[in-house]
Every structure is written in structure tokens, then in C-alpha cells.
Image (cartoon, coloured by chain):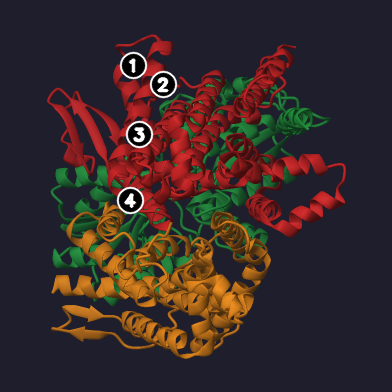
């Protein structure tokens, strides 16, 4: 198999490169398996429909991990950036639906537009707020996300022969008869072309992973990690803290915007109410459970935690209750010293497996030191 | 007159936020964690009062007392089961557990109390005050909310500064390890903080549901988030800060809705929050922590 | 050790794949070809009706009512021997009132369970997310309560409830024609598609009918408890009537807070207000005189409604059904009637059933007398024609408002 030769190659590589290649291969293997299953008709509609959202959530988790894990700052505004990316790309696609007919030209452009707009917002919000830290930064990013959601949910945008109309309710737009409404307040945007697919999602996830791993191990990434571990010391050796923080923040926003674009092109409707603080928190849960600073962990956690409530559907009204219990138990098992030792000593055979999962955090830390 | 009315409504809403915010601030100060489940404890308190009053016809004040006891016990139990095992873990891990607890409470309530909203009977029987020939009305609920929140802030400040347990809380919030060396029982202090915070949540539940008499399993979520914002606004960890933050958030929310745009009133609150934090990064009354190398 | 780690990594990947497998294998038994064509027939023929609505979260109250009512109607149909020798089977999934992935996940899961007809979704947002999917699969979609106009853009989707614009227009017409008031205030939920849809239509029609909108106030999902500022504005602008195109839970708060503020205008609402008087522990004197246009009134005197309410209460904890539930109940009965007249059987594919139902429901001679209207007919657009009843709340009960 190809994978084996690839694995053999990684032996000669640096540890971090090896780590990243293992992740790429893992993701690719899962992708290939799912593609084969899907094309042979062995995948249920439910799982088939989950493939794109799984990519979306994985990208979101990986990108948030750059801010939370590598920069060490808590951000609760991921849904806001995703929202910007989703709306920007959706509007781009709708506007160019008539002019750019080729999907594989239009969609990458739309994704790029989504990412760039989100990154611009990331920079705009980052400049004033990145001098805050800890929970204050968290609350400001949460506030920012909520502002974005509220503004989009209240916004009516239409276009007619006289130009663009923007208002806070439908009647105030005063559209001419030939006008079309683009954003319709709470009803959101409709008619976004369904360009997303698992293949596109996989490619975007792979790009996200490649960007993230290379960023972490780059000169900039090392500087960012130095800032996380000791900002004053880093500043004293002449590094511009704000610049590095801003780059990371913008990169996170950019990737979240890409995820937003992937998301908005997967459904026939786009409503701002989706992008509330609960979504930001959900993504943070992926990051923390997957291991702070651990890119691969984010992907695995995003996949598992998205699948759990879906696979629990058969118990209907209890499923969210079970999900919450699973969340608490997983958190205690992965973070409590005694629980870890208990598991490790009592389940000899599972030891390696458990260690692997539970040590993720430690290895992530060691990697830095 | 309209302005005065809005101002009063804002202060009354803000007082409720303040009482909720106190719960956040206390727990944050001691355990350095954002207790996301706090808003849902309010909902539990609301349901306890509702069922004591309707199913068991218990006197409203006694019902509030029962709710305070139930929520205090609930707070201690949550702390023991979900947070205590994570004492040594990062604050982020505890945050996620708190989110898990929040989902747990919401979904248990959905199964226990049903999905339909119920109407809450006000526990307050203070009459409304009508001023300027009825142009300005202050409801009994508003008066009680304002008075109760002031009393709680004064009581809490006295407790923290004058009693031994209170000062133990201060010491733990200042430096956990040093406090332990001085013979303070950290675990007990943290449990006590959770107990007080959750007891306050029950009172907040009574105030919130009396002023806005509807109750369902998600009732506590949004006020919880806004009160959390208020706690940060005032400077998280500071008791008077929570009070000031709560009232300011309430007033800005109502005035923003009345005079700028109702659709964007939340956006306005959050925008003001961002502005304040940019100017004063640790909130209005927050302590500036000097970083050491 | 390095090798070991790598093996583990692969093992983890394999676990993930297995997890994914587990999901499909458990469902494969009932899943059919694309379009959800069937393999459910085991002995007796079964027609699988899929339902989708919020069972958890903020909007659970609407989804649970619909689920209960569908189950009730399905049980009744089956107890009476089914239709054409077919039994009906309900599969219901939680879409959390989401407008994206969760709604589509619920839809896909229903497909895996062999859904042949979709009686859903409950909320507009979720409905918009799945209408294109059901079109692709050509599954007949019959929504009890998703009322936006966009919902029925595709030819396979029909509504049991009124379209939002119709409700807004009908309300403005009623107020103007009966000279209920001329100075109108509106309080609506701008973050909700249903509410803002009615409001927009109401505003247009009010202008045409010469009604004066003195105050147009809104609130959002995130601040739906304190309405003091909105009420104050209506009061100060001298509104004689406040139009409330919102759900009953918020309306109950507005009524309470208006009373506190010493503001007593007439209140007028749409079908969302139904349920107001059955809120547990609600002081119905507050709702005295509230007028609403609703297709369904739980305390209506007609036999069908009384039977339904009685059966519903007996089955579900003495809860009073609201209009969502009534629409859903009607939906099942309408489907049963169509299944009978079109000779639909459980072994047909979803797509064939869809075509037959489309022909049946739009047929000139088809009409249905149900809980939510008499002589209900559908046009090819998917819109239902039925006239809302204007009722006023009197002594805690609905009383017909006669012109």
C-alpha cells in the first residue's frame, strides 16, 4: 500500500514533520475509506450527509486551536468569523452565479472571498482587543460574535436598478419592482449554489492541516509559542508581540471563514441564528477535549463529538442528556490525574491506547519546551 | 417621563443581572473558572419555587427559601462531582465541564418539567408606585429587585470582609498555595463559594421569574450570558463591580432598545462592553494584575 | 515505541472508520435506494411517515406537540384498520429547530429509516434547509407549521398552515374592515422568520387600507423577556391596538408588562397566539379581550375538535394541544384520505407516492374538513385555502368574533 511507503519515508524526517504526516495520512485514509464506501452505496444517508459538516467542524476546531493552543488566548468568537465567511462567500456566489458559470472556478474564489473577509474582520477586531488577555479577551470575542450574528439577523440587503439598498426591515429597503432581495433579515440568504462536497471539504481540511502544522513549526509559530509561554521575556528579546498575535488571530479567522464558506454552500438556506455563542462554545469543546495545542486531537474530537449526538438519535429525547454526561465524563477522565492513573493501571491491554489519547496534552506541552 | 420610565426599567433589569453576576464573580474569584452552568441553576430555582407554590401551595417566601436550600445543595453537589476532580486541571477543562453541566441541567429539566413554558406567579406582593399621575410606574417587582440586590451586595461585602470564612475566601482568591500554607481549607472554601453562588442563583431566579413571569428549561441561559458579560464589565472578581456592571448592562440594554434600535439592542450592549474593555482592560472595578517575569 | 505510536495512530483512524460504520450498519437494515424507496414491507404493508421538529432546546414545545399529534393520528388510523390495508408508521427526528446541518441530519436519518412521506418540518428555518433535499429525492413534503412563502417554492411541498403573508394581510384587512382601530402599534420578533414575515405583509396591507402604524417595535431571540421599552413606545405614540404577530409565550409577557405599565390597548394576534390561555398557571384575565385569527381553537364546540382535544389530553399528560398539533393531526388525516383515494400502498417508492399525492391533493374535487378549517383545498403552489377564524378571548375561552 502507498501508505506504508509514505510511513517509511517519515522515519527519516524530523519529529514534527512526522507527526504532521501521520495526521495527513490518517485523514486521507479515512477520506478514501469513506469515498469507497460512499461510491459503493454502503453509507447511510445520515453518515453521507454528515461528511461535509464533519470537515467544517474539523477545520473550525483546528483553526481555533491555533489561537487557543498555540497563542494561548481564549477566543469565543469563532462562530462570528464563520458567519462572516459564510455570508461573504454566499453573496459572492450569488452575485457571480450568472457570470462565472464554471463551478470549479467560482467556488474556490468564493471560498477565498469568505476566508479573506473573515481575516479582515479578524484583523479589525484583533488590533484593539488583542492587548486584552485571558477571560477578558474571551468575553470580547464572544461579544464580537454576538454583534455579527445580531447585525446579520437584522439586515435586509437588496439590489435593483438604482443600486444597493440596505435597511433594518423589508419595507424600508424601498426596492424597485425589478429588485431582488439578497439578505432578508431573519430569513437569511437563499439560493446559495450547492457547490460543497466531501471532496472539497477534504481538500480544505487537508489545506488547513498543512497550513496549521507549517505555521506552528515556522519561525512565526515558534515566536507565537514563545509569547504564550512568557510574553514579557519574548518582548524583551525584541519580538513584536502584537504583530505575532495578530497574525495568528487573522489566520484563525481566515480558516474559520473558509469553513463558513464550505458550510454555506452545503445548504439551501443560510440564517444568522445558526452562528450564536453556542456554536463558538461547541468548537471550543472540540479543541479542549482534543487536547490544547494538539492539531490531530482537534480533528478527532470534532469528528467524535459531532457523531455522538447523531448516533444517539435512536434514544431521541434522552440523547442530549446522554451527550452532556459523556462530555462531563470525558473531561474528567482526560483531565483528572487519579482517573488517568486508575485507567492506565487497571486496563493493561488498553494501556497504550489510553495513554495515547490521554497523553496528548502532555506531548503537546513537551513539544513546546 | 418616557426616559425616566426606561431608566427605571433598566435599573430593575440590571439589578437582576447584578444578582446573577455576583454568582459568576464569586466563583471566578475563588476558583478562577467561568461557571457556565450558573444560569441553569437559576432555572432550577425558578422551577422549585413554581412547584412549591402551585403543587404544594407553600407560601411564596417559604418557597424562595426552599429554592435557596435546593440550589445551594445542587451547587455543592455539582462542585463535588463535576468540578472537584478537575482542581489540578487547566481552567479551560473546567470551563468545558461547566458547559457539560449546563447542558445536563437544561436537558434534565426538559425531561422532568416538560417542554411547555409555564407561567410563574410573582413571589412579590409589594404594590406598584405610580408617580406623576401614572406617567411613571415602578412595579413592585422592580422595587424588590433593586432593594434585594443592594442588600445582597452589602451583605456579601460584609461577609467577605468581616467574617473568618469570608476572609478565607479572599485569601484563596489572592493566592491559593499561600492560603493553604496559612491553614485555610481550600476545598471547604471553594465548596462554600459554590454554595453561596448557587443560593444567590435561587434568589436571582425568584427575581427574574417574578419580573418576567415565564419559565422553561432554557430560561436561565440568556440572562446567564448577559450577567456573565456584566460581571466582566464591572471587573470580574469584584463584588461591587458585579453590581455596577449588572445595572449598567441593564440600563444600556433598555435605553438602546428604546432610543436606538430594538433589533440591535444586544449588539449595542456588546459594543459598549468592547469599548469599555479596550479603555479599561480589566473592567470598571477590576484589579490590575501586574505581570512578573 | 515510535512504531507503537504509529500503529496506534492507525488504530485510532480505524476506530473512527468503525464508528462511522456503526452508524450506517445499524441503519442499513431499513435504508433503501436513493429517494428512500422502501424495503420496510414485512408481512403487512407499511407506509412510513417521517416527521421532523425540535424536541430539545428552546423551541421544543412546538416540536413535541407536533410529534404527539402525529402519533395520535397515526394510532387512530391504524386502530381503524389502516388505509387500503396499509398501516402507517411514524418516525420522528429531532432537528433542534436548526437551519443547517442538524435539520439536514434529521432528514437524512429519516430517509435511512425508510421515510416515504415527510410530514414536516415544524419550524420555518429547518424547513428551508430541507426543501431542496426533499425535492431532489422527490419525497412529498407536507409541513404542518412552517409558514414562510419560500417553504413551498418547490412543487413537492405543501403547507397545512397559512402562509405568513396571508396571515399578515388577513389581519390588516380584518382590523381595517371591522374598524377595530386606526392607530396601530406592532411588536414583532425580528429574529424570527415567521414573525417578521407576517409583520412585513401586515405593514404593506395596513398602508393600503389606511391604517396608521404609529409604533413598530421589535425584539430578538436574545432579549425576549423585557418588553418595557417597546410597550412604552406604543403607549406614548397612542396606539389603540397592538398587533402581536408572535408566539404566545412572549405575548403572555407583553400582556403582563402592559398591565404593569398601565397600558390597556386592544391586542390582536395571529395563530402563534393560540396556546395563550392554556399556559400552565397563566392568569387568563390578562388575556381578556385579546383578538386573534387562528385556524384552530382548542375549546371550540365542534365534535371533531372536542374529540381530538380529549384524546390528546388523555394520551399526553392532560396537556392542551395547540394549533401546531392540530395542523399536524389534520396532516395525517389528509394524507390518509389521499392514500386511500390514490390507492397508494406501502411497497411503492417515495417518488411514486409523491407524484400520486401531488395529483391527489391538487385535484379539483379534493377538499378536506379538519380541525383547522373546513373545505381545505390546495393549489399547485402548495398553498392551502382556508379561512382563519377570528376569535376573542372571553372569560378565558375563545368566543367567535362575528362581523
In this rendered view, identify the residue nearer to me: B238 or C382.
B238
The chain containing the residue under callout 4 comes to A
In this rendered view, identify the residue nearer to me: B112 or B33.
B33
**Which percent across, then down, holds residue C309?**
57, 59
Which numbered disc, 4 or 2, marks the residue that appears first in the sequence? 4
The chain containing the residue under callout 2 comes to A
Where is residue B182, by image quadrant? Answer: bottom right
Q: CA distance from mark 4 to mark 2?
A: 40 Å
Visual hue assigned to chain C: green
Q: CA distance from mark 3 to mark 2?
A: 20 Å
Judged from the image, the secondary structure of the residue bearing numbered disc 1 is: loop
Say which residue appears at 71% left-offset and 12% top-offset: A2
Above or below residue A11? Residue A69 is: below
The residue that mark 2 highlights is A193
Q: Which chain is orange?
A: B
Q: Which mark is residue A118?
A: 3
Q: CA distance from mark 3 to mark 4?
A: 20 Å
The mark closer to the camera, 4 or 2, is 4
Whether the residues at callouts 3 and 4 have beta carbons within 8 Å, the answer is no
Count residues near mark 3 (Cα–Cα under 10 Å), then give few for <14, some for 14-19, many for 20+: many
The mark closer to the camera, 3 or 1, is 3
Q: Is residue C216 visible?
A: yes
Above or below residue A106? Residue B136 is: below
The residue that mark 4 highlights is A131
The chain containing the residue under callout 3 comes to A
Q: Which mark is residue A97?
A: 1
Which numbered disc, 3 or 1, marks the residue that appears first in the sequence? 1
Where is residue C80, by image quadrant? Answer: top right
Judged from the image, the secondary structure of the residue bearing numbered disc 4 is: loop
Amino acid at each position: 500500500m502507498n501508505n506504508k511507503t509514505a510511513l517509511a519515508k517519515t522515519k527519516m524526517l524530523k519529529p514534527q514533520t512526522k507527526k504532521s504526516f501521520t495526521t495527513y495520512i490518517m485523514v486521507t485514509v479515512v477520506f478514501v475509506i469513506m469515498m469507497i464506501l460512499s461510491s459503493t452505496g454502503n453509507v447511510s444517508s445520515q453518515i453521507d450527509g454528515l461528511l461535509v459538516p464533519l470537515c467544517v467542524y474539523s477545520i473550525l476546531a483546528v483553526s481555533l486551536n491555533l489561537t487557543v493552543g498555540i497563542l494561548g488566548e481564549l477566543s469565543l468568537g469563532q462562530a462570528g468569523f464563520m458567519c462572516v465567511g459564510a455570508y461573504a462567500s454566499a453573496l459572492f456566489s450569488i452575485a457571480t452565479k450568472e457570470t462565472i458559470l464554471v463551478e470549479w472556478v467560482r467556488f474556490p474564489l468564493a471560498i477565498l472571498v469568505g476566508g479573506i473577509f473573515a481575516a479582515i474582520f479578524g484583523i479589525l477586531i484583533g488590533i484593539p482587543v488583542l492587548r486584552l488577555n485571558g477571560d477578558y479577551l474571551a468575553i470580547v470575542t464572544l461579544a464580537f460574535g454576538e454583534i455579527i450574528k445580531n447585525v446579520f439577523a437584522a439586515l435586509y440587503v437588496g439590489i435593483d436598478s438604482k443600486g444597493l439598498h440596505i435597511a433594518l426591515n423589508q419595507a424600508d429597503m424601498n426596492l424597485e419592482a425589478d429588485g431582488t432581495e439578497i439578505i432578508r433579515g431573519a430569513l437569511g440568504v437563499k439560493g446559495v449554489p450547492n457547490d460543497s462536497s466531501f471532496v472539497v471539504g477534504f481538500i480544505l481540511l487537508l489545506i488547513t492541516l498543512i497550513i496549521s502544522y507549517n505555521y506552528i513549526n515556522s519561525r512565526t509559530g515558534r515566536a507565537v509559542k514563545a509569547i504564550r509561554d512568557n510574553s514579557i521575556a519574548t518582548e524583551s528579546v525584541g519580538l513584536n508581540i502584537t504583530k505575532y498575535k495578530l497574525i495568528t488571530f487573522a489566520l484563525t479567522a481566515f480558516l474559520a471563514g473558509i469553513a463558513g464558506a464550505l458550510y454555506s454552500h452545503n445548504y439551501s438556506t443560510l440564517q444568522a441564528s445558526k452562528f450564536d455563542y453556542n456554536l463558538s462554545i461547541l468548537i471550543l469543546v472540540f479543541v479542549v477535549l482534543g487536547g490544547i495545542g494538539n492539531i490531530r486531537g482537534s480533528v478527532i474530537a470534532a469528528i467524535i463529538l459531532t457523531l455522538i449526538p447523531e448516533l444517539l438519535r435512536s434514544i431521541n429525547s434522552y440523547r442530549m442528556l446522554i451527550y452532556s454526561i459523556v462530555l462531563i465524563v470525558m473531561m474528567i477522565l482526560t483531565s483528572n490525574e487519579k482517573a488517568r492513573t486508575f485507567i492506565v493501571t487497571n486496563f493493561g491491554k488498553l494501556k497504550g491506547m489510553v495513554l495515547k489519547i490521554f497523553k496528548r496534552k502532555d506531548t503537546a506541552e513537551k513539544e513546546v519546551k | 417621563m418616557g426616559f425616566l420610565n426606561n431608566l427605571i426599567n433598566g435599573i430593575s433589569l440590571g439589578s437582576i443581572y447584578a444578582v446573577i453576576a455576583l454568582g459568576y464573580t464569586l466563583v471566578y474569584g475563588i476558583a478562577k473558572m467561568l461557571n457556565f452552568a450558573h444560569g441553569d441553576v437559576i432555572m432550577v430555582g425558578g422551577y422549585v419555587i413554581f412547584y412549591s407554590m402551585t403543587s404544594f401551595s407553600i407560601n411564596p417566601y417559604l418557597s424562595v427559601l426552599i429554592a435557596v436550600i435546593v440550589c445551594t445543595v445542587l451547587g455543592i453537589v455539582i462542585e463535588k462531582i463535576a468540578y472537584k476532580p478537575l482542581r489540578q486541571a487547566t481552567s479551560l477543562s473546567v470551563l468545558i465541564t461547566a458547559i457539560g453541566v449546563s447542558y445536563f441541567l437544561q436537558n434534565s429539566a426538559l425531561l422532568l418539567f416538560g417542554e411547555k413554558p409555564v407561567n410563574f406567579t410573582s413571589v412579590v406582593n409589594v404594590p406598584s408606585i405610580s408617580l406623576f399621575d401614572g406617567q411613571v410606574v415602578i412595579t413592585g417587582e422592580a422595587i424588590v429587585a433593586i432593594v434585594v440586590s443592594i442588600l445582597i451586595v452589602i451583605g456579601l461585602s460584609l461577609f467577605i470582609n468581616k467574617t473568618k470564612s469570608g476572609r478565607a475566601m479572599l485569601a484563596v482568591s489572592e493566592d491559593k498555595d499561600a492560603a493553604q500554607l496559612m491553614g485555610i481549607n481550600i476545598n471547604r472554601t471553594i465548596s462554600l463559594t459554590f454554595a453561596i453562588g448557587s443560593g444567590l442563583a435561587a434568589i436571582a431566579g425568584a427575581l427574574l421569574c417574578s419580573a418576567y413571569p415565564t419559565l422553561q428549561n432554557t430560561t436561565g441561559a440568556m440572562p446567564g450570558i448577559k450577567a456573565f458579560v456584566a460581571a466582566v464589565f464591572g471587573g470580574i472578581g469584584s463584588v461591587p463591580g458585579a453590581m455596577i456592571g449588572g445595572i449598567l448592562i441593564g440600563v444600556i440594554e433598555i435605553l438602546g432598545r428604546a432610543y436606538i434600535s430594538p433589533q440591535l439592542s444586544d449588539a449595542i450592549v456588546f459594543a459598549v462592553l468592547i469599548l469599555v474593555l479596550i479603555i479599561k482592560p480589566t473592567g470598571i472595578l477590576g484589579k490590575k494584575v501586574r505581570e512578573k517575569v | 515505541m515510535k512504531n507503537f505510536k504509529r500503529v496506534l495512530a492507525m488504530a485510532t483512524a480505524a476506530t473512527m472508520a468503525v464508528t462511522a460504520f456503526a452508524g450506517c450498519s445499524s441503519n442499513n437494515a431499513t435504508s433503501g435506494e436513493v429517494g428512500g424507496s422502501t424495503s420496510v414491507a414485512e408481512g403487512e404493508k407499511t407506509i412510513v411517515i417521517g416527521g421532523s421538529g425540535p424536541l430539545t432546546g428552546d423551541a421544543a414545545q412546538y416540536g413535541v406537540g407536533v410529534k404527539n399529534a402525529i402519533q395520535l393520528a397515526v394510532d387512530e388510523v391504524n386502530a381503524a384498520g389502516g388505509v387500503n390495508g396499509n398501516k402507517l408508521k411514524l418516525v420522528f427526528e429531532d432537528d433542534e429547530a436548526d437551519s443547517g446541518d442538524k435539520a439536514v441530519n434529521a432528514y437524512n436519518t429519516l430517509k435511512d429509516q425508510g421515510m416515504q412521506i415527510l410530514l414536516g418540518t415544524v419550524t420555518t428555518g429547518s424547513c428551508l434547509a430541507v426543501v431542496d433535499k426533499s425535492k431532489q429525492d422527490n419525497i412529498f413534503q407536507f409541513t404542518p407549521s412552517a409558514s414562510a412563502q419560500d417553504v413551498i417554492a418547490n412543487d413537492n411541498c405543501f403547507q397545512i398552515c397559512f402562509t405568513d403573508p396571508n396571515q399578515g394581510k388577513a389581519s390588516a384587512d380584518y382590523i381595517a374592515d371591522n374598524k377595530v382601530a386606526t392607530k396601530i402599534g406592532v411588536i414583532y420578533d425580528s429574529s424570527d422568520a415567521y414573525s417578521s414575515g407576517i409583520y412585513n405583509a401586515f405593514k404593506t396591507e395596513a398602508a393600503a387600507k389606511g391604517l396608521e402604524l404609529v409604533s413598530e417595535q421589535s425584539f430578538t431571540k436574545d432579549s425576549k423577556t423585557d418588553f418595557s421599552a417597546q410597550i412604552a413606545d406604543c403607549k406614548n405614540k397612542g396606539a389603540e391596538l397592538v398587533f402581536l404577530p408572535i408566539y404566545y409565550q412572549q405575548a403572555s409577557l407583553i400582556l403582563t408588562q402592559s398591565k404593569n405599565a398601565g397600558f390597556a390597548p386592544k391586542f390582536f394576534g395571529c395563530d402563534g397566539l393560540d396556546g395563550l390561555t392554556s399556559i400552565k398557571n397563566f392568569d387568563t384575565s390578562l388575556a381578556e379581550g385579546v383578538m386573534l385569527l387562528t385556524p384552530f381553537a382548542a375549546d371550540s364546540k365542534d365534535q371533531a375538535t372536542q374529540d381530538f382535544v380529549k384524546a390528546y389530553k388523555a394520551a399526553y399528560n392532560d396537556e392542551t394541544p395547540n394549533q401546531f398539533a392540530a395542523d399536524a393531526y389534520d396532516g395525517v388525516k389528509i394524507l390518509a384520505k389521499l392514500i386511500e383515494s390514490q390507492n397508494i400502498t406501502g411497497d411503492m417508492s417515495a417518488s411514486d407516492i409523491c407524484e400520486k399525492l401531488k395529483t391527489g391533493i391538487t385535484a379539483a374535487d379534493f377538499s378536506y374538513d379538519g380541525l383547522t378549517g373546513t373545505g381545505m383545498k390546495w393549489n399547485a403552489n402548495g398553498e392551502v385555502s382556508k379561512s382563519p377564524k377570528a376569535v376573542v378571548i372571553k372569560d378565558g375561552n375563545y368566543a367567535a368574533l362575528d362581523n
